[in-house]
Amino acid sequence: LGMELGFIGENLEFDIRPRQDHYLVPPNGYFGLKELHDRSLGNKPTDTELHEHERKKQSSFIIFLLTAVHGVDHIFQEVAKEICESVGGTSRAPPPKGFMRMWAKLDTDHATAKSPRAAENIDTNRVAWIFEEPSQLRDAFEKAQKIFGAPLRVKNGYDPGFPAMAETKGYRNILANYKFSPEITWGSLAGRDGKNDKATKTGAAWDNFRKLLLDTFLNMGYADEAAFDDELTYYMHCCEAARAHYCSKDMQKKPVEIVVE
């Protein structure tokens, strides 16, 4: 397999690691979160206040990103499935990456990343392609480039130099990230340009994302949404505000662009 697949991606050059905020920039103010200032008489915010404020700021971007992720996933999965099946493969579509998974990474994998740190999550919309023959994988990779454009990143586990036994217990695959730009604006996807099938599916996906977020917080032991503390109440506000932003006049003519895997 190394002889047949190990060369894929070797001639591609990647200047920088892709990030979601190359394409998705939140509105100023992080959905009403005010900056902390010296309060009076030289008193500065406490370390606890600074930490909580930063956590809210970083988490608000997670919600902003996931709103876009859920809004476009049905389009991405449809395109990805067509590519895969057209060359004889099987497409598997896991759900978008979850809030808590991304939240935990703020203090681990992305702890030293540039703010907003959650922009490092480039596997939020993802799909797995399964092939029986190496030629099918090569054909799929070539077709993906024609439809998505050149990949932003490729990690080829079939490269003979990759130490699969040491790093992945022998498992090998090819991981590729692309900029997904399906030639549709946020205005069209939000239904501002009139009702359409994609807008209907996006609206349902946004309703479902809010429910997923609500259930995540309820599972922390709260009786209902009204019982949430200030932080969780702010996150639910971010969910509504992010949706309103993507549906706004400011976004009406902006093309949908997001990093996928």
Image (cartoon, helix red, strand yellow):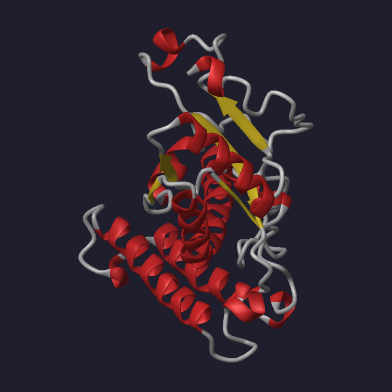
- Please tell me which residue is depicted at 55% across the width and 15% down the height of the picture: 3
Residue 133: name its quadrant: top left
Nearer to the camera, 154 or 58: 154
Nearer to the camera, 123 or 59: 123
Is residue 256 placed above or below 20 in the rendered structure? below
- Give the image location of residue 36, x and y in percent: 66, 53
Left or right of 131 on screen, residue 68: right
Tell me if residue 167 can be seen.
Answer: yes
Is residue 32 placed above or below 77 in the rendered structure? below
- Give the image location of residue 103, x and y in percent: 45, 44
- Give the image location of residue 142, x and y in percent: 63, 41
- Please tell me which residue is depicted at 54% across the width and 11% down the height of the picture: 160
Left or right of 14 on screen, residue 160: left
Is residue 233 placed above or below 58 in the rendered structure? below
Work out which quarter of the rendered image holds the C terminus and state it. Answer: top right
- Give the image location of residue 49, x and y in percent: 54, 46
